[in-house]
Each structure stands twice: as C-alpha cells, then as structure tokens.
Image: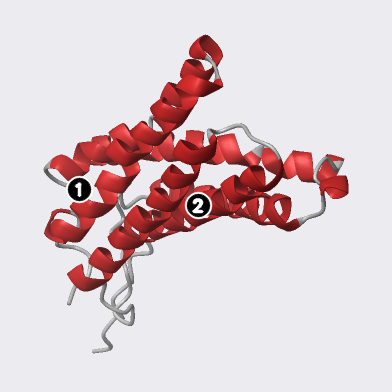
Amino acid sequence: MTETPARTRPDLPSAGTAPFGVQQIRRLGLGLTAGTLAWCASIFAFSTVSEGTPERIGDLTGLAFQLGLFCLLTIQFRTRATGLSRPAVLMLKVEAVVLGIASVWSLLHGVFPASLQDATWLMVLDICWPLSMIGMMIIGIKLAFAARWRGLLRWWPLVAESWVFVTIPATVVFGDAAARWVGGGHLLVGYATLGVLLALRPDLVVADDVPRR
C-alpha cells in the first residue's frame, strides 16, 4: 500500500526552518532598544523639528530606530506573533515593505544635499514614515488579540506602538517644545522598554508551535 505524503501546513514553519531561540530574541530586543535610544538622544537634543545638521542627525538616528523596528518585526514574524493565518503573517510583510521605504527616505534625506531634500519623489517616500508607525499600531492590536505572546509582552507593544497617536496630537496642541519631551519620553517608556523586556523574558514570546533552540 502506497503511503500518502504528509501535507505541510503553509502557516507553520517547515521542518527545514532554522530554529528561532531565546538568544536571537535577546539580541534583536537589544537592537530595538539601541536604535530607540539613538533616536531618543536626538529628539531630546534637537526636538522633532529642526534644520541643518540637527535635522540630518535626526534623520539618521531615526533610521537607527527604524532598523530597531526591523528587529522587532523579525521577532514578531518568526514567532508568528499576530497569528498563524496567511493574513496575519501578510500584515507583517506589508509593514516591512512600508517601513523599508520609510527607512530609504530617512537615509536619503539625511545624506542628500539641501537642494534635493525637497524633491517631490522624496516627499512621496516620506509618507511611508507615519504610515509605518500606524501599521505598527495595527500590528500591536492584532498581537494582543492573538494572545500568542504572554504576560507584559502581550500588551507592551500597544504601549510602544501608540507613539504616533500620542506625539502628533501633543505637537499640534502644545507645539514642538512639548513634542521633544512627549515624543522622546514615550519612546523610552514604549519601544526602549519593549526591547529590554524581550531581552529579559524571551520565553514569553516563543510559542510551542514554533521551533526553538
């Protein structure tokens, strides 16, 4: 009798997938914290709105923060934090694309000469910066409902990823001076702390159906 080969579920890691363990989560968590601290330092020093050299420093430290977000997205993708369904995984991939475009803007705006910084095509890329932050908030909501991460780490992404919804209204109401302290302080409480929590408690985000070391 001929045996029928077992079907591989597309929503779970295949047998050949390299295991994703606590040491990797720790390193990526610290990467998130490091990138966040770099941007925080710039915001506290120069505010969120500046010109000249401070603006370029803000762009490049913002890029460091975005690279930190890629560390977070990697953990979320490898642990299937938003769920096992195709749409749940797809939303992480879409966010990675939007965040990638935003990162390209940060790099180019940080190194291009002033005459090119206001180019129309570059301004189009800039739209992806706030869109990427809104996308992170949507992921945080989905992650909380999916309940694959546990304890504080189930809820802390919501705290971190509310940045855009806290900082932008504060800027509008209280001005740039307030945005410096609100924006920088929220990053410390949110994303910087989230990275530390991931480094300290990686066991809270590795599910039983994801290979680990």
Q: Residue at x 14, y 46 (%)?
A: 150
The crowding category of the residue bearing disc 1, from other C-alpha atoms within 10 Å (few below 14, some 14 to 19, many at least 20), is many
The answer to whether residue 198 is above or below residue 137 is: below
Q: How is the image coloured?
A: secondary structure
Could one spot residue 207 in this view of the protein?
no
Q: Residue at x 55, y 14 (%)?
A: 172
Between 115 and 122, the one lying in front of the other is 115
Left or right: residue 114 versus residue 143 is: right
Between 196 and 95, the one lying in front of the other is 196
The answer to whether residue 155 is above or below residue 174 is: below
As measured in the structure, the alpha-carbon distance from the residue carrying label 2 to the one carrying label 1 is 22 Å
Q: Nearer the viewer, mark 2 or mark 1?
A: 2
Q: Quadrant of residue 71?
A: bottom left
The total of numbered circles placed on residues is 2
Residue occupied by mark 1: 149
Q: Quadrant of the N terminus?
A: bottom left
Residue 24 got which mark? none
Q: Earlier in the sequence, mark 2 or mark 1?
A: 2
Q: Residue at x 72, y 55 (%)?
A: 108
Which element is circle 1 on?
Answer: loop
Could one spot residue 150 in this view of the protein?
yes
Left or right: residue 77 versus residue 206 is: right
Q: Residue at x 80, y 45 (%)?
A: 117
Residue 66 got which mark? 2
